[in-house]
Structure formats: structure tokens, C-alpha cells
């Protein structure tokens, strides 16, 4: 694991870097998760040895620091990723984002088009005001969620973790997330980007791919995604937590999306 001190925020952002002399791929995680936890099993596949893989934990999540002065908006998360890529002198990366990470990836491509050569999003928040978990969190005040709501959410995850592998992994990463980061990131997701994500995705003049779990295939018609300029890829026998529910299927969908 590596870290970068962000001077303006006074916090460390931490990441895995395979440091290969190859085309970079950046992995961005969802709300309450960790790229290091979610994608480590992905990049052990020999097909990814052709790329330089970076697994980045957003501030407030995973192994990164949890600064209270940080706003945790989509654009602020994107700025920290841009700072890290600038520090590493990397441009024209394939950026892969799951859920919230996909929405941040869109914001990054808008802010810094020199950094993103291809966008691969896995069930991101495509519209403002949409997000089951973020809605639950943001329906409370920040104080209420930090003081009581966070622990109630963790307790609910504990009840379902024994019956569901994905929930057991989400319990581990969510419980290690900073409550303030969770709350402010949820608010940011519901506010969305400007222009709204769907319009932003359509305007991005780069190759784009959309990955969905088979269980959620009917939530967004593929025709709409094709109109946004996305190729579409399905992970069989999986839902939103596709990288845990079908790791091999997720790896295969990623490879197809990258080379499409």
C-alpha cells in the first residue's frame, strides 16, 4: 500500500499501485466500501498484468484518512483522485468506477479530460435523487446520523451478514467508514453533478462502457445506455455487489468493457 499527503486537506489518501510500465487503470469504489477491499481479487487475474492498476480509497473510506474539514462532495472526491494521478504523472487512464465511484469517475472526466481516456461504470448513480442507501442516510440530519444513525445501519448489516456474502463484506467496509464521510457523500450523490449525470455521460467524448449485474438488468434499458454512447456488459448471477457475488464474471465483464 502507498499513500500521498494532500497538503491542502492535511490528510493521507491511500492506494495500491502495481507500478507496471503499462497503460493505467484506476479503480474507484462505492459508498461505504473500499477499492482495496473490492478490487484486490479482480487484479490478481493474469489478464490485468497488461495494465498498471491503481486501487484508490476515497478520503473517509477504507484505509484513507478521514478529515473532518473535507466536504466529501462528488467534485471534491474527483479532485483528490486528480491530485493523486497528477502526483504519479499519469494521464489517459481507463477509469473504472462502481456505484458512487462511477459517478465520481464521470465528474473526474468532466473536470480533467486529460486524465481519462476511457470510462467504465458499474451501476453508478445516473440521476440526482436516486440511491437507496444514500437516501436512507441523507434523510437524517448530519448530527443524527453521526451520533445514532450510523450505528443503527451497522447493526442492520450485522443481521443480514450471516445470510449474504456480499453483506458480510459490506459490513466490514461500511463499519470502517467515517460517519461524516458517509453522510456528506450521500448528500453529494443525491445532489448529483452539473449537468446531471445522464447528460454529463452523454456529453463525454470518450469511449464509455456500462456494467450491470444480471439481477438488475431491467432497471436501466440498454437502449438508453446505447443512446448515451455506452457499450453494455452483464455480470451473470450477480446484483449490485457484482465483484463479490460473481468475481470471475465481473472480471470477464471488465475485460470486455476495457477492450470494447
Image: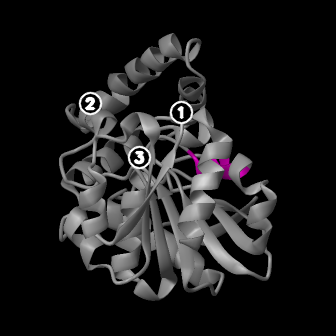
Quadrant hosting residue 48: bottom right
Magenta-highlighted residues: 34-40
The CA distance from mark 3 to mark 2 is 15 Å
Q: Earlier in the sequence, mark 1 or mark 3?
A: 3
Q: Position of residue 98 (x, y in %)?
A: 47, 52
Q: Residue at x 49, y 14 (%)?
A: 160
The answer to whether the residues at label 1 and label 3 have Cβ atoms under 8 Å apart is no
- Note whether residue 64 is visible: no
Picture coordinates of residue 15, whole percent (x, y): 66, 61
Q: Which residue is mark 3?
A: 181
Residue at point 80%, 76% (across, down):
20
Between 178 and 186, the one nearer to me in the picture: 186
Dot 2 surroundings within 10 Å: few (below 14), some, or many (20 or more)?
some
Q: CA distance from mark 1 to mark 2?
A: 27 Å
- Residue most toward the front? 223
| Residue that badge 2 annotates | 136
Instruction: Say which of marks 3 and 2 sits in front.
Output: 2
Q: Nearer the viewer, residue 75 or 35?
A: 35
Amino acid at each position: 500500500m502507498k499513500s500521498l499527503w494532500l497538503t491542502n486537506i492535511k490528510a493521507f489518501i491511500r492506494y495500491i499501485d502495481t507500478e507496471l510500465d503499462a497503460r493505467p487503470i484506476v479503480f474507484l469504489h462505492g459508498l461505504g466500501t473500499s477499492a482495496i477491499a473490492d478490487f484486490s481479487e479482480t487484479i490478481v487475474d493474469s489478464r490485468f498484468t497488461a495494465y498498471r492498476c491503481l486501487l484508490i480509497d476515497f478520503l473517509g473510506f477504507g484505509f484513507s484518512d478521514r478529515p473532518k474539514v473535507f466536504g466529501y462532495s462528488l467534485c471534491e472526491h474527483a479532485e483528490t483522485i486528480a491530485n493523486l494521478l497528477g502526483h504519479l504523472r499519469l494521464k489517459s487512464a481507463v477509469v473504472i468506477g462502481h456505484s458512487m465511484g462511477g459517478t465520481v469517475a464521470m465528474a473526474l472526466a468532466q473536470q480533467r479530460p486529460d486524465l481519462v481516456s476511457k470510462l467504465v461504470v458499474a451501476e453508478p448513480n445516473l440521476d440526482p435523487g436516486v440511491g437507496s442507501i444514500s437516501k436512507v442516510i441523507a434523510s437524517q440530519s448530519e448530527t443524527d446520523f453521526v451520533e445514532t444513525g450510523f450505528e443503527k445501519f451497522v447493526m442492520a448489516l450485522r443481521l443480514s451478514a450471516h445470510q449474504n456474502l456480499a453483506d458480510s463484506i459490506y459490513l466490514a467496509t461500511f463499519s470502517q467508514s467515517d460517519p461524516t464521510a458517509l453522510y456528506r457523500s450521500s448528500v453529494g450523490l443525491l445532489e448529483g453533478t452539473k449537468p446531471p449525470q445522464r447528460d454529463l455521460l452523454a456529453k463525454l467524448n470518450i469511449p464509455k462502457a456500462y456494467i450491470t449485474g444480471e439481477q438488475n438488468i431491467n432497471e436501466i434499458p440498454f437502449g438508453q445506455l446505447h443512446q448515451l454512447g455506452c457499450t453494455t456488459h452483464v455480470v451473470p448471477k450477480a446484483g449490485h455487489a457484482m465483484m463479490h457475488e460473481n468475481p470471475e464474471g465481473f472480471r470477464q465483464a471488465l475485460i470486455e468493457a476495457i477492450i470494447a
